[in-house]
Amino acid sequence: MSWRAGSHACTILLAVVAASGGCGRPQGVLFPAMEPARVWPSPPDMPRIKLLGVLSDSGDLNAARSGGEVFANVLRGPRPAIRFSGPHALAVREPGLLAVADGPGAAVHILDLENRTHLLVSGFGEERFAVPVGVAWADGRLFVTDAGRREVIELDTDGHFVRSFGKAQRDQDGSGVLRRPVGITYSSARQRLYVVDGDDHQIKVFDLTGTMVVTLGRRGTLPGEFNFPTHICAAGDRLLVADSGNFRVQLLDLDGVCINTIGKKGDGAGDFALPKGVAFDKDRHIYVVDAQFENIQVFDPNGQLLMAFGEEGSGLGEFSLPAGLTIDGMDRIWVADAGNRRIQVFSYMRTSS
């Protein structure tokens, strides 16, 4: 290349750099309005649930881009998006942190919905996640249940390791305290972590230092007993537990006393085939994901069925092997649509009355 040609190329390059400085991309709307809106139940009934959007990878956060980042993308191409492999459980820390346990990806995702960042945490130090399946925020920290490692792992909001517990501790028979930890939730009323141990058919309660303080339940079919429980949710003075092997959901107080059971094995309205994620909205409605029916059923606080939404498929509002869900302070319903490798977000539309 001649000096003149090289100079000309450098001039063009500098011009592009200068131009790109003022050509950044502003932060986009997280969930743009959908036309037509997708709501449940369908008209002419009064809608109660509305689809807001879908998150499949970090690009769906519509983050802002500086001019320099735009130019760098022109030169080297865009950075590969961080994708979900099979989201299993979710937890929201207000005002805008979403944690996702991704068992098939052997990772935890931490999404900052305000700053639109997506952090992928696959390990800590020399250690790696095996099968992370549950997440819960407590006291500004993130607690992750890893069924493969048989322990709970505590991280800070930046994904840095704090401690782990449940594996090194020993039960009376010499085995680890946790055999297969799956669901996890935090009760602010008790300042306790409630961990579902699926293989022990129990809920094991820990303080925030990782010390186990009590166990709740045993294997069985009576109220307060469990058969391969999976997911759990705490709200106020109540617990919801997906008692999956008994094809029901149990509503408990914080001491594990059963207040009500919801559902039974069957294929009718209000029945369950494989109940998984459970959650309350602000009106104490109860939401239950069924991984086999591939829908979500909504019950009133007394356990009476109100409605269901979703069906098998890969389209908007459809599910494939859905697992966990969580509901945030704005009554947005975040659903781990595991088989479709995405998170679908809905809104509970409260009545004006």
Image (cartoon, grey):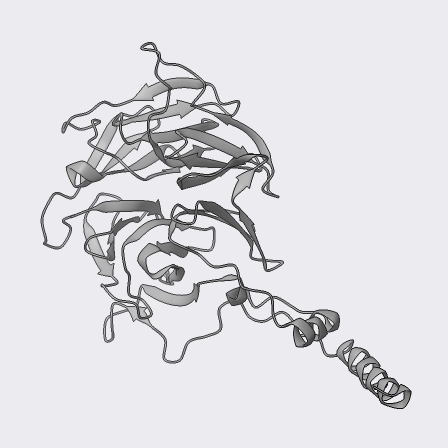
Left or right: 302 as drawn, with respect to 86? left
| Residue 150 place in picture, x, y as percent | 39, 29
Residue that appears at 47% across and 46% down: 107
Left or right: 321 as drawn, with respect to 24? left
Task: In this rendered view, identify the residue nearer to me: 229 or 56.
Answer: 56
Snapshot quadrant of residue 139: top right
| Residue 47 place in picture, x, y as percent | 30, 68
> Residue most toward the right?
3
Snapshot quadrant of residue 69: bottom right
- Give the vertical position of 132 relative to 76 (above or below): above
| Residue 180 place in picture, x, y as percent | 33, 30
| Residue 188 place in picture, x, y as percent | 47, 32
Residue that appears at 25% across and 75% down: 43
> Residue most toward the front?
1
Which quarter shows the C terminus? bottom left
Task: In this rendered view, identify the residue nearer to me: 341 or 274.
Answer: 341
Residue that appears at 29% across and 25% down: 256
Residue that appears at 31% across and 63% down: 48
- Give the vertical position of 135 relative to 112 (above or below): above
Left or right: 212 as drawn, with respect to 322? right
- Give the vertical position of 131 relative to 110 (above or below): above
Which quarter shows the N terminus? bottom right
| Residue 282 visible at all | no
Task: In this rendered view, identify the residue nearer to me: 148 or 215.
Answer: 148
Task: In this rendered view, identify the residue nearer to me: 213 or 166.
Answer: 166
| Residue 54 visible at all | yes
